[in-house]
Image (tube, coloured by chain):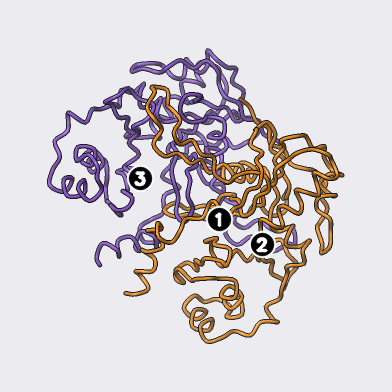
Chain colours: A orange, B purple
């Protein structure tokens, strides 16, 4: 089995209103079963999901957290506005967003945007992803998948990896349940988080900062599905012992 | 930028004493800067790190945990023997191994081994990885990196991804600190967990069970380093709020 991954060259600096699907199709040839991996920051820019701190008035809770954290209280307010729950506010500011995504600072991006502006995660990542996917399919006549990505840290280990925050026509989890292993034993669990693995692979080529390539094509896998959603990946509260642990800390 | 990933075909069923480096070199052509990604199970087999439950006598603690968990107490004892700390025992059995690696059931593998046997993680993964890496370099005359992988779950999201448990000549973290972004802003954090991203990419091709390919080559990246260690990746206890949260639960 083999797989190729390559950056789409010559993507211009994206601004509000830009048609990302067209820009991608103008700069590369798309094939059936391609997985188009797109960094969420350019989608945020195209969708105009930028905002400024000076437009925000912090409330009581934001002021409290800001002083503990040595953060700008308006920034904290922006995070709170985008969060369903604050899991821990110090020494990391980890929240669950309205989409069910757990990340630092609600995924608000301070880098790669004009000074004074901040970029949001898309409010409905699957929807943003699908819109671009359908447009690419319409332009090219090919059947593809799309993954929208961000970079996140993780428990127990330092460093960040590319991860999936929205999907089009690819299930975030590939289910190996019930299949046999090499010795005929039934595989115990094995739900493979393929969308995150693909996002990580793409991030190796995307780079950060100056040399950034926000669009990567992954070719050679056959993972296209019918409808899919990033919601398939989020653990229910009931099963989430790590959330329980963090909530335990705030009660102490 | 581009990257290829491909499975090494015709790797035979590995048994104790097998020379994995030679077997790999006999079945593929290695190039400079290749990253050879190897599933830890075959290294465990070659190193003879297999054991049987019937050889284990469970202690008090193992018996207690086993009854809560509905697990075999001998299996629980095997996990305890390999662990520095039990972070949580129910509903998941999450431990920190003596290597500092946090995973379910100390990474003991019940699949892809003969019935009645279990496979261990290597006791010193960097050492196992380096031994194979140096052997490949000696055989081929090429300069390469090697990553030893396992599959692990993660916090907040379901599913497992390929992750790095040992490295040879590749830093698990690529440091982007101090570099500028597209607008000249200094990048805030950004330590990219490249070894885990590569492990995840390889896992997309490795498969699980019957169709498994335990060795994947990643080609096209220039990430070879001088000496490196997987220890670079583990978060110190002092910084680890998630561990604190789990410990909080056991005090309640």
Image-quadrant location for residue B106: top left
Characterize the local packing of mark 2: few (<14), some (14-19) or many (20 or more) Cα atoms within 10 angstroms: few
Question: Label for residue B80?
Answer: none
Mark-to-mark CA distance, 2 and 3: 33 Å
> Would you name the residue on which mark 2 appears?
A124
Tell me which residue sits at (43%, 39%) in the image.
B165
Characterize the local packing of mark 3: few (<14), some (14-19) or many (20 or more) Cα atoms within 10 angstroms: many
Question: Label for residue B104?
Answer: 3
Looking at the picture, do discs 2 and 3 lie on one chain? no
Which x, y percent locates residue A57? 63, 85
Q: Is residue B60 left or right of residue B91?
A: left
Q: Nearer the viewer, mark 2 or mark 1?
A: 2
- A249 or B117: nearer the eye? B117
Q: Is residue A115 left or right of residue B147?
A: right
Residue B181 seen from this side: no
Which x, y percent locates residue A109? 65, 64
Image: A168 above or below B121: below
Which x, y percent locates residue A239? 40, 56
Question: Label for residue A152?
Answer: 1
Image-quadrant location for residue B107: top left
Give the letter of the chain under mark 2: A
Which x, y percent locates residue A192? 51, 40
Characterize the local packing of mark 1: few (<14), some (14-19) or many (20 or more) Cα atoms within 10 angstroms: some
- B75 or A109: nearer the eye? B75
Tell me which residue sits at (51%, 83%) in the image.
A61
């Amino acid at each position: 089995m083999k797989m190729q991954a390559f950056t789409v060259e010559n993507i211009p600096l994206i601004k509000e209103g830009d048609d990302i699907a067209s820009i991608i199709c103008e700069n590369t040839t798309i094939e059936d079963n391609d997985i188009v991996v797109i960094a969420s920051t350019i989608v945020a820019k195209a969708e105009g999901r930028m905002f400024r701190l000076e437009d925000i008035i912090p409330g009581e809770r934001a002021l409290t957290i800001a002083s503990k954290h040595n953060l700008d209280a308006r920034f904290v307010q922006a995070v709170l506005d985008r969060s369903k729950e604050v899991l821990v506010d110090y020494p990391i500011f980890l929240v669950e967003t309205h989409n069910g995504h757990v990340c630092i600072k609600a995924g608000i991006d301070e880098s790669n945007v004009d000074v004074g502006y901040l970029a949001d995660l898309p409010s409905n990542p699957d929807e943003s992803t699908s819109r671009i996917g359908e447009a690419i399919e319409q332009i090219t006549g090919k059947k593809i998948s799309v993954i929208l990505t961000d970079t996140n840290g993780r428990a127990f280990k330092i460093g960040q990896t590319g991860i999936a925050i929205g999907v089009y026509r690819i299930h975030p989890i590939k289910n190996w349940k019930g299949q046999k292993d090499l010795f005929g034993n039934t595989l115990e669990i094995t739900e493979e988080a393929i969308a995150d693995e693909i996002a990580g692979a793409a991030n190796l080529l995307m780079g950060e900062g100056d040399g950034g390539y926000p669009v990567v094509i992954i070719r050679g896998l056959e993972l296209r599905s019918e409808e899919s959603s990033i919601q398939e990946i989020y653990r229910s509260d009931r099963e989430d012992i790590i959330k329980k642990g963090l909530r335990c800390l705030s009660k102490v």
